[in-house]
Amino acid sequence: MEVEKLKYAILNSDAIVVGAGAGLSTSAGFTYSGERFQRYFSDFIEKYGFSDMYTAGFYSFATEEEKWAYWSRHIYYNRYVPAPKPVYENLLKLLKDKDYFVITTNVDHQFQKAGFDKQRLFYTQGDYGLFQCSKPCHQKTYDNEKLIIRMIAEQKNMRIPSSLVPRCPICGRKMDVNLRSDETFVEDDGWHAASKRYEDFINKHQDDKVLYLDLGCAAILQLYSRCHS
Ligand SMILES: [Zn+2]
């Protein structure tokens, strides 16, 4: 059966490249709609009629104070809280004794939180945990954890205090979350270093048996249990 074939392929590969998408985080419990969305955003749902976090993330708020009231919660509950299910930890157990590399479009930092080697990760599309200049006037990113937590603690009636609206330390413009949505996305030094490590990994293994695992799906839990049974 397919799972047995995959188990064999993992054991007999020289190297593994994991391509991970949104489905992996959904299977870890980071669902963007339903009960979880209701629990954290009932006030926004009532006021704005939002149906889920995907569409809410594209909403054009009238003010920065409203925008960051929404986004601080969105970022906090999808980036800074532990994943509800140990999907990433289980994936690491499967890979840890192999020469592996992960390339992912996910922006929620879950590979690092599960203990994956940072040197083996390439986050191509950014990170909820980083801010960048909206222009951008310079190619640098900034950790946002402390500010995000303050935005959540100090927001009232779906607005943060104006003093907490993030501004670029160089030019004073608005800040954005470091997410690839258009050509303003900042590829900082860490991004370029990870891109280079990924390229080196592929080059190093070009004559080897490389298994490419495409994980956007919930199959990883099942796979894990089979591999260890
Ligand atoms: Zn700037």
Image (spheres, rainbow, N blue to C red):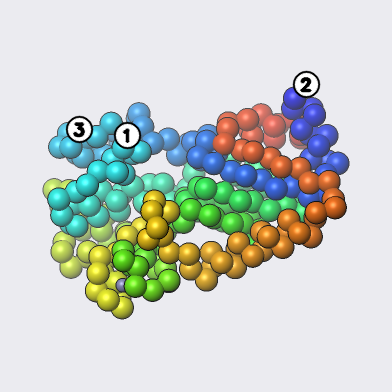
Please tell me which of labels 3 and 2 falls first in the chain. Answer: 2
- Identify the secondary structure beneath mark 1: loop
Residue 61: x and y, percent?
Answer: 19, 48
Identify residue for label 3. Answer: 49
Residue hosting label 1: 52
Q: What residue do we see at 24% from left, 74% from top?
A: 172
Query: On the picture, is 115 further left or further right than 75?
Result: right
Location of residue 123 by image quarter: bottom right
Look at the numbered disc 2 and give the secondary structure of its residue. loop
Task: Give the residue displayed 41% in from the left and 46% down from the top.
Answer: 78
Q: Residues within 10 Å of mark 2 (few under 14, many from 20)?
A: few
Q: Residue 127 lies in what quarter of the image?
A: bottom left
Could you say where residue 54 lies in the image, as x and y percent from the top left?
Answer: 35, 38
Callout 1: 10 Å neighbours few (<14), some, many (20+)? Answer: some
Query: Crowding near pointer 3: few (<14 within 10 Å), some, many (20+)?
Result: few
Q: With respect to residue 185, does 102 lie above or below?
A: above
Q: Is residue 98 left or right of residue 71?
A: right
Residue farthest to the front, as pictured? 183
Q: Which residue is mark 2?
A: 1
Viewer-side residue, 181 vs 106: 181
On the picture, is 121 further left or further right than 179? right
The residue at the point 48 percent across, 68 percent down is 188
Q: Secondary structure at mark 3?
A: loop
The answer, for residue 144, to whether it is visible in the render is no
**Amino acid tagged 2:** Met
Quote the CA–CA distance across marks 1 and 3.
9 Å
Q: Quadrant of the N terminus?
A: top right
Q: Is mark 3 within 8 Å of ligand 1?
A: no
Q: Are marks 2 and 1 in contact (CB under 8 Å)?
A: no
Query: What amino acid type should be assigned to the residue bearing mark 1?
Result: Asp
Whether residue 165 is visible, yes or no, is yes
